[in-house]
Image (cartoon, grey):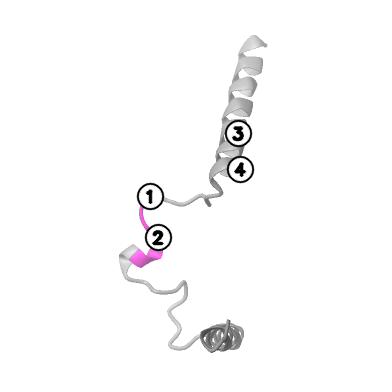
């Protein structure tokens, strides 16, 4: 029974350490391989053009960037 308690305590310590590390650094968890970009894949799907929702998001982002660029202040 003590083995289970020790193992459970170790898991709790690891999870608490990860939580504290996240709170302090505010970094997202990422892999070490670099993701799909390292393989040469720009996006998750291999469609020739993005879906309508993505086109709308990109258009909104471009419009917001244009507004920021032309901002007087």
Residue that mark 1 sits on: 32
29 vs 34: above or below: above
Residue that mark 2 sits on: 35
Residues at badges 4 and 2 in contact (C-beta under 8 Å)? no
Secondary-structure class at tag 1: loop
Residues at badges 4 and 1 in contact (C-beta under 8 Å)? no
Residues in magenta? Answer: 33-37
Q: Position of residue 68 (x, y in %)?
A: 55, 83
Residues at badges 3 and 2 in contact (C-beta under 8 Å)? no
Q: Earlier in the sequence, mark 3 or mark 1?
A: 3
Whether the magenta-drawn stretch holds residue 50 is answered as no
19 vs 12: above or below: below
Within-10-Å neighbours for mark 3: few <14, some 14–19, many 20+? few
Within-10-Å neighbours for mark 1: few <14, some 14–19, many 20+? few
Within-10-Å neighbours for mark 2: few <14, some 14–19, many 20+? few
Q: Earlier in the sequence, mark 4 or mark 1?
A: 4
Residue that mark 4 sits on: 23
Please give the name of the residue rendered at 60% of the width and 36% of the height, measured from the top-left corner. 20
Q: Nearer the viewer, mark 4 or mark 1?
A: 4
Tell me the CA gap for discs 3 and 2: 24 Å
Q: Which mark is residue 14?
A: none
Q: Position of residue 67 (x, y in %)?
A: 57, 87
Q: Earlier in the sequence, mark 3 or mark 2?
A: 3
Residue that mark 3 sits on: 15
25 vs 65: above or below: above
Please give the name of the residue rendered at 57% of the width and 86% of the height, measured from the top-left corner. 72
Most foreground residue, 46 or 31: 31
């Amino acid at each position: 029974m003590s083995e289970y308690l020790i193992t459970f305590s170790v898991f709790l310590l690891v999870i608490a350490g990860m939580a504290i590390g996240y709170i302090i650094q505010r970094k997202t968890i990422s892999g070490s391989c670099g993701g799909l970009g390292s393989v040469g894949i720009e996006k998750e799907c291999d469609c020739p053009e993005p879906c309508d929702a993505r086109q709308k998001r990109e258009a909104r982002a471009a419009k917001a960037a244009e507004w920021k660029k032309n901002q007087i202040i």
